[in-house]
Amino acid sequence: MRNVKIFFRNALSLLIIAVAAASCSKQGKDYTDYIPKDAAIVMKVNMGSIMAKTDAKSNKLIASQIGQLTGTEKEMAEALLGNPEQLGIDMKQDAYVFIADKESDKGGIVFGLTDMDKFAATLSQIAGSPEITEKDGMKRLCPDGETALAFNDNFCLAFIDESKKEAAAQLDALLAMPEQDNINALKSFAAFKAGKADMGMLIALETILEYGQEYSQMLPEDFTVDDCYMAYSILFDNGKTTMSCRYDAESEASKEYIRKYTGISGKAGTEFFKYLDKNALMAFVTNTNGEKLTEYLKSMPGLEQELDADRDVREAFSLLSSIDGDIAIGVNSMIAVPEILICANVKNDDIVKYLTIKLNGTKLEEGRYSANIEGLISFYYGMDGNTFYASLSPDNRDGLKAKDESLADSRYYDKAKNSYAYGMINAANIMSIPLVQNYLQYAEPAVIQLLNNLDYIEVANKDPESGELVIYTKDNSNLLKQLFELGIGQLS
């Protein structure tokens, strides 16, 4: 993409004018019908919700900055914070910003209006009394050299291009766009639009691969991406912040291709939780069919040749194929070294044999081994039935031992047992580690306060196509407000 930064700068300017969002309170066509279905990226922003959660109008630093403004700028800023409806904009729902295609920086923004006349007056204040014309029942103007706007009683649509002539032409095309060509023709967008979020992004998989060419090389040659999408969202609630992502596809063929590989992993069990302390610093568990995973990896371009040429890669694939079930990694505590424990369901003891050779391991008794890493750290590993384990803790010298109070008795258990993959970070306990506290003494007080208010973090795949990351805070506060105040403080 040639100049995405310029596009976003201009779109942000329009978003500030719009302040945000809306499904109109008046009757009229859904304004998302003016977003093309082949848009590379679509973002939604609920500025009404964001401004309420940041409590921006009560922020003393913002008030002091507004106090330094004069005239129209001050009036606009005060209206924006205190009574944005004076600007003619509906703050109740979502505004949408979109990039038209992955090879350019052109795109637009659409949002709802509560009062067309107030909005026109707002534009006149900002753009210095621009010429407003009318065409096909829509007010038109070009406030600068690369933006064209059209608005009526219900909504405003703006487009940004290399010149106002091209922007106006694109605007005409969007307003006359057939129903089958707008983004509401996509099932992926319907789910994205309905999802509750403060901010969200729907991005075509083609666009992701355009940004990261290395990712396209990881996909099987027979996988087509032209109708696949990734949807991301973030919702700031009191006490927790939820970031979600979901894969979706328009055609059954693409969905079936993904289903073909869902057999690589199943729902993860929580059997290994009994070996991790209830107050463990972190833990991760997933479920993998090693044979199917290696089959999938081999279908990626170039890997067959690498397998033929590299013995280490062949050995790694062989060990990976021996995994058959759950894999868990946990850190129980940290003093001098992290007390790490790794467990995996396996079909054979090939991993034990491999480690014994590579680490020059010592057999302690049947199924129990130890090794020394760099002459400093003792490492214990072995087999317990069909479970391979490896640990840096002396507690596991004689094998796996269940904890008296384990993760199976913790607040994390219910969510973990219903997930395809699950991870947790006990932020509160990590922050209490002396080494961490020593590092934090050099941080800004506001940063320390924010980090000390974190309770724990969870990552979970509820199904093979979606996942979420949830950040919990101790005092039921809103993380967005804390981040906002931190950012404002740094800027001031």
Image (cartoon, helix red, strand yellow):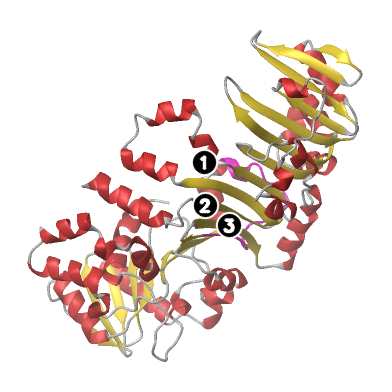
Residue 78 on image: x %, y %: 18, 69
Nearest the viewer among 194 and 175 is 194
Vertical comparison of 265 with 370: above or below: below
Check residue 222 for magenta coloring.
yes
Amino acid identity at mark 2: Tyr
The residue that mark 2 highlights is 472
The residue shown at (55%, 53%) is 470
Q: Residues within 10 Å of mark 1 (few under 14, many from 20)?
A: some
Check residue 461 for magenta coloring.
no
* Span shown in magenta: 214-233
Task: State left or right for residue 37 relative to residue 90.
Answer: right
The residue that mark 3 highlights is 245
* Residue 63, quarter of the rendered image: bottom left
* Disc 2 + disc 3, Cβ < 8 Å: no
Vertical comparison of 59 with 333: above or below: below
The local secondary structure at tag 1 comes to helix
The residue shown at (26%, 75%) is 84
* Disc 1 + disc 3, Cβ < 8 Å: no
The residue that mark 1 highlights is 428
Task: State left or right for residue 322 relative to residue 248.
Answer: right
Which residue lies most toward the top here? 375
